[in-house]
Image (spheres, helix red, strand yellow):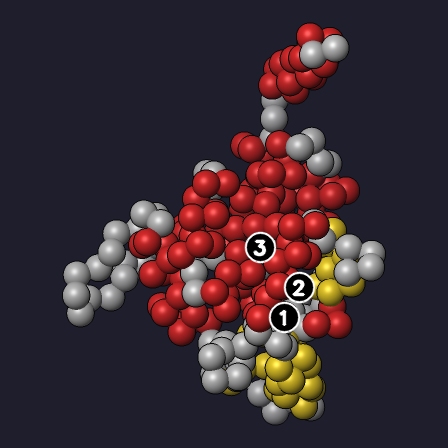
Amino acid sequence: MPWKPERVFAVRAAMPERYQAMVDLGGGCGLRQGEILGVAVDAIDFESDTLHVVQQLKLSRSKAVFAPPKGGKLRDVPLPGPVADALRARMKRFPPVEITLPWKVADGPPVTERLLFTGPRGGHIWRTSLDEEAWKPALAAAGVIPAPERGRPYAESRENGMHALRHFYASVLLDAGENIKEALAEYLGHSDPGLTRRVYAHLMPSSQERTRKAVAAVFDAIQTV
C-alpha cells in the first residue's frame, strides 16, 4: 500500500537538509533512486515545467557510472510548482557540482555533469551511504521503522526504500484520474504499460468511487453558490 502524504512529508522533514529535495523528486515526479542521484542541472527545464529523465547513477563492477535510465527509456516528466520551488531553493543553498564519471560501464568514456545532489565533500553520492546515514534514520524519526539499539544496524525494510516514493506518486496520479497507459506508464518510465497495470491495478479507483466523487463534486459546487 502506498504511503500517505503525512508520512512522505514527515520523512522529508527528518532528512538532512541537503537531501530533502530528493523526497520531492521521488514523490512529486516518480523518479527512481538512481535517477534522483543522477539528476543534472541541465535536465531541469523551469521554463516549460518539465524534468528530462535521461540518466541515472549506478554501479558497474563496484564503480559509480552514469547510465541511461532503467530499460534505456528516456522520458519527460511534468515538474509540479512546489517541486520546482524546492529544486531552486536546493540549488541556491547547495550549488550544483561538476562530477566526472564513466558512461555506462566502469571503463566507459568519461562524462561530466553538474549534479543537483552531491555529498558533503562534493563527490557523488553512494546509495549505501545515503540509505544508512540519511534515509533509514529519517524513516526511524518519522516512525516508519523502529530505531535500532545503540551499536546495532537498522532493520531491513525493503518496502520502505526510496522506491516507496514512486508508489506514492503513482497513487496520487491514479486517484486524480490519470490514464494508466498514456500517463502513468510514461511518467514512471515503464516500457510495458501492462506492467504498470499489474503493479497498480489495486489502486485504480473503482467505478463506484468515481461516481461518488463526480456526483459529490457537483452537489458541493451547487451548495456553495
Q: Residue at x 32, y 54 (%)?
A: 141
Within-10-Å neighbours for mark 1: few <14, some 14–19, many 20+: few
Query: SS of the residue at dot 1?
Result: helix
**Do the residues under discs 1 and 2 have CB atoms within 8 angstroms?**
yes
Distance from disc 1 to disc 2, alpha carbons, whole Å, reads 6 Å
Q: Which mark is residue 24?
A: 3
> At label 2, which amino acid type do we have?
Arg
Q: Residue at x 59, y 66 (%)?
A: 90
Q: Which residue is mark 2?
A: 88
Relative placement, left or right, of 165 versus 144 is right
Dot 3 or dot 1, earlier in sequence: 3
Q: Is residue 56 something that shows in the picture?
A: no
Q: Residue at x 46, y 71 (%)?
A: 127
Between 123 and 69, which is closer to the camera in this rendering?
123
Image location of residue 99, percent across then percent down:
62, 85
Image location of residue 215, percent across then percent down:
69, 11
- Looking at the image, the residue that sits furthest to the left is 150
Dot 2 or dot 3, earlier in sequence: 3
> At label 3, which amino acid type do we have?
Asp
Q: Quadrant of the C terminus?
A: top right
Query: SS of the residue at dot 2?
Result: helix
Relative placement, left or right, of 38 versus 42 is left
Q: Residue at x 44, y 54 (%)?
A: 13
> At label 1, which amino acid type do we have?
Lys
Q: Is residue 142 above or below residue 87?
A: above
Within-10-Å neighbours for mark 2: few <14, some 14–19, many 20+: some
Q: Which residue is mark 1?
A: 92
Distance from disc 3 to disc 1, alpha carbons, whole Å, reads 16 Å
Query: SS of the residue at dot 3?
Result: helix
Image location of residue 9, percent across then percent down:
48, 48
